[in-house]
């Protein structure tokens, strides 16, 4: 105890505050007596960078829990489980528990998966990734080209790094041994680092198990959950992506995200 007291951080050189026009006063010096920028602006820029690096296609950025319409008990259940998973993400980092979203196309699997990624970035401040299965396999296969700059292991590591990864659109075309093994490698190396993975597929749960192998499903189910989306497609209601974006009440917040993610800000 007495040894530790020697390690106290140096106090700031003076008690000065700096002022951010948007967020007000903040201490000018950090605990190492280094001058710093507004911590809230810094955090926002960091979140925007995570968002931009996440791989979420820009047109999906608006998909959040608060604009997921849950008018039936099954939809409410899906929303509650997805939101609960996102809210308790810090606990998921203790067990590496992932999640499986399966079922009918157009029911909002990608919407909720993206909402989870956004929440982990916006609220928990972690980096989080989104990829389609096809893009992931294409990145792996590109490592076999003679002019490849990345190895298979590099691509795996790149996909294992973020505390959360969504692998979307796992479909019937992904059933080769190569792809099955690659998916297992990915889920497994992420699991070993306590980094949860969310798998999303239009297949039913048993078809998905047959496709990607029970060992992947077993890994995913430890500490995680499965949501089955078995209601009618929402696509006809969702006119198109652009009008959803324009009509959304958080359009201003979206514009801010876009602005900051595309600005080459500080840090
Ligand atoms: N319950 C819902 N509330 C609001 N929008 C929804 C809902 N379900 C789906 N959508 C929207 O419908 C479109 C298709 O949903 P998507 O998430 O791509 O479905 P899936 O990934 O299951 O095929 C998207 O624009 C999505 O935002
Ligand atoms: Mg989808
Ligand atoms: Zn600020």
Image (cartoon, helix red, strand yellow):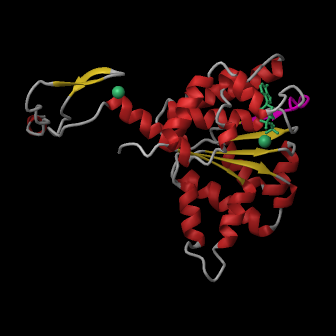
Residue 191 at x, y = what percent?
58, 51
Q: Specify the segment rendered in magenta.
A: 226-235
Residue 22 at x, y = what percent?
36, 22
Query: 226 above or below 264?
Result: above
**Residue 247, image quadrant:** top right
Q: Is residue 245 left or right of residue 88?
A: right
Query: 77 above or below 151?
Result: above
Residue 123 located within the stretch drawn in magenta: no
Q: Decide which of 38, 105 is in the foreground and name it.
A: 38
Q: Decide which of 84, 241 is in the foreground and name it.
A: 241
Query: 52 above or below 85?
Result: below
Residue 234 located within the stretch drawn in magenta: yes
Q: Is residue 167 left or right of residue 93?
A: right
Quadrant location, the C terminus: top left
Residue 11 at x, y = what percent?
10, 31
Q: Decide which of 104, 59 is in the foreground and name it.
A: 59
Q: Is residue 201 left or right of residue 159?
A: right
Whether residue 173 can be seen here? yes
Q: Provide the major secondary structure of the magenta segment.
A: loop
At a point 87% along the width and 43% down the height, the residue shown is 204
At a point 74% along the width and 38% down the height, the residue shown is 110
């Amino acid at each position: 105890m007495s040894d530790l007291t020697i390690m106290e951080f140096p106090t700031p050189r003076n008690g000065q505050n700096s002022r951010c026009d948007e967020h007000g006063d903040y201490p000018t010096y950090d605990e190492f007596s280094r001058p710093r920028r507004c911590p809230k602006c810094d955090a926002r820029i960091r979140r925007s960078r995570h968002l931009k690096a996440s791989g979420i296609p820009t047109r999906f950025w608006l998909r959040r829990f608060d604009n997921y319409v849950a008018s039936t008990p099954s939809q409410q259940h899906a929303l509650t489980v997805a939101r609960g998973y996102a809210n308790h993400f810090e606990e998921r980092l203790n067990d590496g528990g992932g999640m499986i979203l399966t079922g009918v196309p157009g029911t909002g699997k990608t919407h909720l998966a993206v909402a989870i990624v956004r929440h982990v970035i916006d609220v928990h401040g972690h980096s989080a990734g989104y990829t389609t299965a096809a893009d992931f396999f294409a990145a792996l296969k590109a490592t076999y080209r003679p002019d490849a700059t990345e190895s298979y292991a590099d691509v795996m590591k790149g996909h294992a790094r973020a505390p959360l990864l969504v692998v979307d659109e796992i479909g019937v075309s992904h059933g080769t041994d190569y792809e099955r093994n690659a998916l297992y490698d990915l889920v497994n190396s992420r699991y070993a680092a306590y980094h949860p993975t969310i798998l999303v597929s239009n297949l039913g749960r048993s078809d998905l198990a047959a496709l990607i192998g029970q060992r992947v499903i077993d890994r995913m189910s430890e500490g995680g959950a499965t949501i089955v989306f078995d209601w009618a497609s929402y696509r006809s209601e969702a006119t198109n992506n652009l009008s959803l974006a324009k009509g959304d009440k958080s359009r201003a917040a979206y514009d801010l995200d876009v602005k900051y993610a595309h600005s080459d800000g500080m840090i």
